[in-house]
Amino acid sequence: MEMPPPDPAILARKAHLVARLAAVLPGDALIQDPRETRAYECDGLAAYRCPPLLVVLPRSTQEVSDILRICHEEGVPVVPRGAGTSLAGGALPTADSVILGVARMNAVLETDYEDRVIRVQSGRTNLSVSGAVEEADFFYAPDPSSQLACAIAGNIAMNSGGAHCLKYGVTTNNLLGVTLVMMDGTVVEIGGAHLDAAGLDLLGVICGSEGQLGVVTEATLRILRKPEGARPVLIGFDSNEVAGTCVSDIIKAGVLPVAIEFMDRPCIEACEAFAKAGYPMCEALLIIEVEGSEAEIAHQLRLIVEIAQRHNPVELREASDADEAARIWLGRKSAFGAMGQINDYMCLDGTIPVGSLPLVLRRIGELSQQYGLAVANVFHAGDGNMHPLILFDANKPGDLELCEEFGAEVLKLCVDVGGCLTGEHGVGIEKRDLMLYQYSPRDLEAQLMVKDVFDPKWLLNPAKVFPLSISEDRRRAALAAE
Amino acid sequence: MNKMLTPQSEAELAECITAAQAPLHIIGGGTRGCAVAGDALTTQGLSGIELYEPGSLTLVAKAGTPLAEIETLLASEGQRMAFEPMDMRSLLGDSGTPTIGGAFAVNSSGPRRIQGGAARDYLLGVRFVDGSGQVIKNGGRVMKNVTGYDLVKLMAGAHGTLGVLSEVSLKVLPIPEASVTVSLAVADLAVAVQAMSAALGSPFDVTGAAYDPAVGLVHIRLEGFAPSVAYRQEKLTADLARFGTAETRQSSEALWKYIGSAAAFVGRTGDVWRISVKPSDAPRLAPQLGAEALQFDWGGGLIWALTPEGADLRTRMAQAGVAGHATLVRGSGETLAALGRFQPQARPLEEISKGLRRRFDPRGLLNPGLMDTDPMTPGRMG
């Protein structure tokens, strides 16, 4: 993956930059020793690494503002970082950039059950937001798989989803307000505890902008009361097509489960070998979870089972208690771990219209044969968010490149059937060069115009989202204009 | 004499904008009466549903498609637009046919906003023509999409100032089997907000929480499968008994239309304001507004206020120390000119908004001034 060459002039000014930052930050907030900055050389996309020039770990909005103002004045790129769990290289540094990590900003600022909102500093982890309101039986709905580790800052940057967003929506649907620090250090408040911020929907465009428009230091999030209970049903089919049709029929019947998870045979086999959850060996498994009181759960599961039975399932297992429910989820939740045991893998997250599921799965199977790399599919079927896991061997020369080529073919396929390159992981560096497959140059230009307004010097999170040639042209033009 | 431009295709729409030499008043069905000087450009010629997949909960339509046409098709498959677009025609004394593009352009969200989200939360993809006459697409027709910046949200609620929508794709939802409204007799606003907070903070998935002080009733809506609704109704009624006596109505569609369209103020003179605040601030703010009549939706977070002409409610909000924003939905030309339709924003936000308008509409053709809340801008409109 090509990254822009570091600016030698910036590298030469390191000591000057350190001195300026040290003047506004406490001693422990500035890391410049290469042995320590190495910890920030990559995120969850560990195939690509580059130690940054410096790392700063501020504790307040004011410190973030000071850092950005100084970097802006010095013309130094800044890479914002939440918990570093991005699977798309969203927090990959360049050698001439400052990593701005928000991990130390993890306080709960206000909990308001009456208005059903919580205000947190953006470095707080996703799961600990729910943890902070658990005492009152509330929770924060978006639940990315990495929720134990990932930060709200990164969730906002990538507009993260999760298994339960079929019912509760993704980050953008649960975000009410932010404190945003602009690249020049200006602090702005957008939205708040009230619904729908005034004026243009700037909150909507900041969410999912991959840290390229500003640094979010605080967020007001919608919290919800927990349902009385939840229970899954596991249904096995002897073909992907039938499983796909069953999903569509359930949705058409007016049942809206909180989650519909889909696993194909390679994934079932791997999970079973790893977690021994007792899954049936079949072509496709659905795990469908519904919520409510006992009676409501029973009623919805009955409707789902009725529909499933019309499709001749090879297995139908309803959880009758918490223990059985946990066992149904066990395999699914260990899917990524199971794959990691087998081999290195690349996780894609293209999204497709639900109706195209059988076609796309078939085509992925054909591509798997063609490239000679195994694929397991596990995904959020209700909203068409695929997660093909392509297995490769990082120690085998050329395998990573082959895997990436295969991945690109799959993502193009997702776009061809009316879907998109990424449903919840973000573009980062991983998919930036495919952007012109989904969007015309003119479509991209409209997005670049937004970046021009928020960050005219193109200093925030360089080399992400857009094809490198486009963003580098823009950055050079901005420099020349000064 | 102002003309009415009615392009029949996206290409014609692009031609109209490219050829324009003077500001255009962008409208859908023309139901909202936000007067902007210049020739009118309507999307009504761009009409038709292009794709509907009930099993994927998605629909794609040209921007000028009448809402009613979409509602009819969805209903034939037992589905609907869950964001309950507001029908402001009676309140504003306008005729015209509401369009899907218009509903998204103003981010028109009804009582279900508190549970299911705003109109913008259901908009999956857009095609639009910007002020330079360029056709741009963003988003798509899938539920989850983080590919590039989310201009879909930016276009929702931009009132046509960044571009003219030509096509939208949206998420639809099943029409629930049953819907009931539990109405509680409550005389005091503070108690009403407490009751609504209790309902919305319950596990019973409330999809509407409104208070009508004129009749002293809190309305709580429950929707879903019949046995589930019956169960939740019983639990909720018991839980809320401490706030007031409850009665239940089975058919509540007309009631929620009445609430969502501020029908209580129809036929009454004066300015109409729509104020978004934190629900728990409503009891403190309401008496300070000097309103002749008030209606509360969104658990108290949405206040509809009918006031004597010219009253500046934004100043009163600031004096009460309440955060949020107030939109002047209906006012005389004079009031609109004096106060502006939209809440002025903090300087840096105003600068960002201006910067976006300058880039998406460099010639200042699209509803110029409509969303500009900077009092220093010449030609600013209400």
Image (spheres, coloured by chain):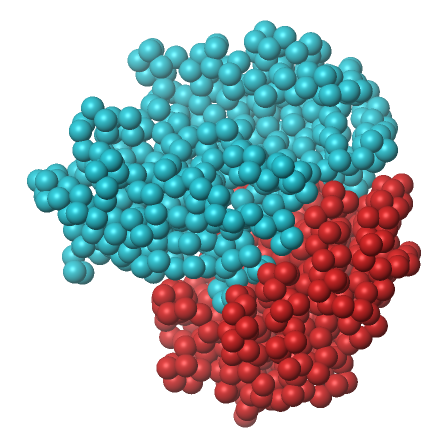
- Report x, y in % for residue A368: 50, 18
Residue at figure coordinates x 32%, y 28% from the top left:
A42
Residue at figure coordinates x 64%, y 61% from the top left:
B279
In the rendered image of the structure, the colour used to display chain B is red
- Report x, y in % for residue A460: 30, 47
Q: Left or right? Give the position of A281 relative to A9.
A: right
Q: Nearer the viewer, residue A69 or B281?
A: B281
Q: Nearer the viewer, residue B213 or B36?
A: B213
Please identify the quadrant where the C terminus of chain A is shown. bottom left
Q: Is residue A245 above or below residue B50?
A: above
- Report x, y in % for residue A76: 20, 46
Q: Quadrant of residue A94?
A: top left
In the rendered image of the structure, the colour used to display chain A is cyan
- The answer to whether residue A98 of the structure is visible from this angle is no
Residue at figure coordinates x 81%, y 39% from the top left:
A253
Q: Is residue B363 above or below residue B121?
A: below
Q: Nearer the viewer, residue B202 or B255?
A: B202
Q: Is residue A57 above or below residue A331?
A: below
Please identify the quadrant where the N terminus of chain A is shown. top left
Residue at figure coordinates x 49%, y 67% from the top left:
A199
Q: Nearer the viewer, residue A465 or B90?
A: B90
Q: Left or right? Give the position of B26 relative to B269.
A: left
